[in-house]
Amino acid sequence: MDALNPQSGLKPEADPAQDLDRRARRNLLLLAGCQAVGQSCNTMMFAATGLSVITFYHHPELANLPVTMQHLGVMIWVFPAALLMQRVGRSIGFRVGSLFGMAGAIIMCTGLYTANFAVMCAGGLILGYAVACLQMYRFAAAELVPIHYRAKAISWVTAGGVAAAVIGPSLVRVTHDLVMPLYLATYAAILGLHVIVFTVMSFITFPSLATAASAAGAAEVAAPPRPLWVIASQPRFIASVIAGMLAFGTMSFIMSASPLAIVGCGFPHAEAHWVIFMHVLGMFVPSFFTGNLINRYGATTVMAWGVALMLAGVAAALAGLTEWNFRIALTVNGVGWNFLFVGATTVVTTCYRPSERGKTQALNDLLVFSTTATSSFMAGFLQDRWGWHPLNWFSVLLMLAAAAAVIWLRYQRPTLSPAH
């Protein structure tokens, strides 16, 4: 993708002849490993929190509040985390995120052990910093490679979630009743995973801001950073962020409610863990080829496929309440999320220069996680008050809005500002 081409990321592109060097591949592989381990923590949080809270707190409509607090934490921490990385670099910034992850896991353990709902919510808030850093891995991946490889790099690192689909739910299944109270060992495992991320991150070589700027075009180097409102007012940025918000918000909405719905239908906790496993697998397996699809067909085409698949997942959920309805609905929902979100992220990376990356990425994730915070809270509330089917009908409205954003993005005139 050409950073100075207004249609960059919107139309199909030929695969570049130049291959990645060994160092870049190593860095991407390690970053994908961190994504796998870090995303496992997030998956475990989704799978365990609602079910662990209802063991002592008898307000099921609030069972997902610690997850909501985690999303709120992302909103609070995303600007400080991004600006810290802009100042001290990705390596130190990501390791600070791991330290917050360790602290948050300890607080979650304490809250569950003492049956203190407020402490668990505080733990979720602290974990939000770690998740804010985790979401920036995809932007860091784009900075590790030449411009033509951005879509592939984002896709490859996102593919680390495939391992998370195995690690996270498997650890929940193994640890949920290992010690009492239920799920205490699960949060202890999250602590251990953040220690692993902290260690691996030390071996990744990230480019400095000066290096990134020297690799950019002369026009970008000479131009001063633009105000955030100028960057955010680009139609391409607006449309891609809206699509990313609705992709993550709808996915979080369905994912957060599904364990409560599954157990509420009389299925065992193990079935909820299995459905989350299939969902996370659906989210990340497509990442092995999403980047190639974007290069071949264009970001907006792949994003449109994502919307269609998420609607298909809703149709499966509305078709019945058997185990396979839940499994198919959540799996297809995950694949649709991958296409829509990876495509939106790829387009966002074409909207800013190297000197603007911190504040622009922070604004993007602030908006995305304001949506996920709202949707995760509403998921528990609506699941308790309305039930699974009305909740899915509401998701249709969100996907129609996402479809409108993709159409707007596809038919924009090429009058966008030069950006990196």
Image (tube, rainbow, N blue to C red):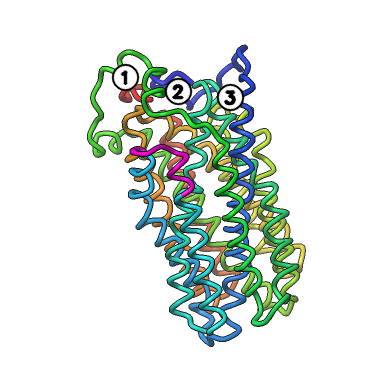
Bounds of the magenta span? 86-95
Three-letter amino acid code of the residue under disc 3: Asn
Relative horizontal placement of residue 378, taking residue 56 as reference (left or right): left
The residue that disc 3 covers is 295
Q: State which tag comes first along the sequence, 2 or 1.
A: 2
Asked if 16 appears above or below 259 in the picture, the reply is: above
Q: For mark 2, give the secondary structure.
A: loop
SS at badge 3:
helix
Image coordinates for residue 372, horizontal then vertical, percent: 46, 58
From the image, give the main secondary structure of the stretch colored magenta: helix
Left or right position of 253 against 220 = right
Residue 129 vs 35, above or below: the answer is: below
Query: Callout 2: 10 Å neighbours few (<14), some, many (20+)?
Result: many
The answer to whether the residue labelled 2 contacts the one labelled 1, judged by CB atoms less than 8 Å apart, is: no
Task: Using the rendered image of the protein, determine whether residue 385 is visible from the camera's viewpoint.
Answer: no
Q: Nearer the viewer, residue 159 or 385?
A: 159
Q: Which mark is residue 220?
A: 1
Please provide percent x and percent y for residue 27.
59, 32
Query: Residue 215: x percent and y percent?
Result: 42, 18
Q: CA distance from mark 3 to mark 2?
A: 11 Å
- Amino acid type assigned to the residue bearing label 1 in the image: Glu
Amino acid on which disc 2 is placed: Ser
The residue beneath circle 2 is 8
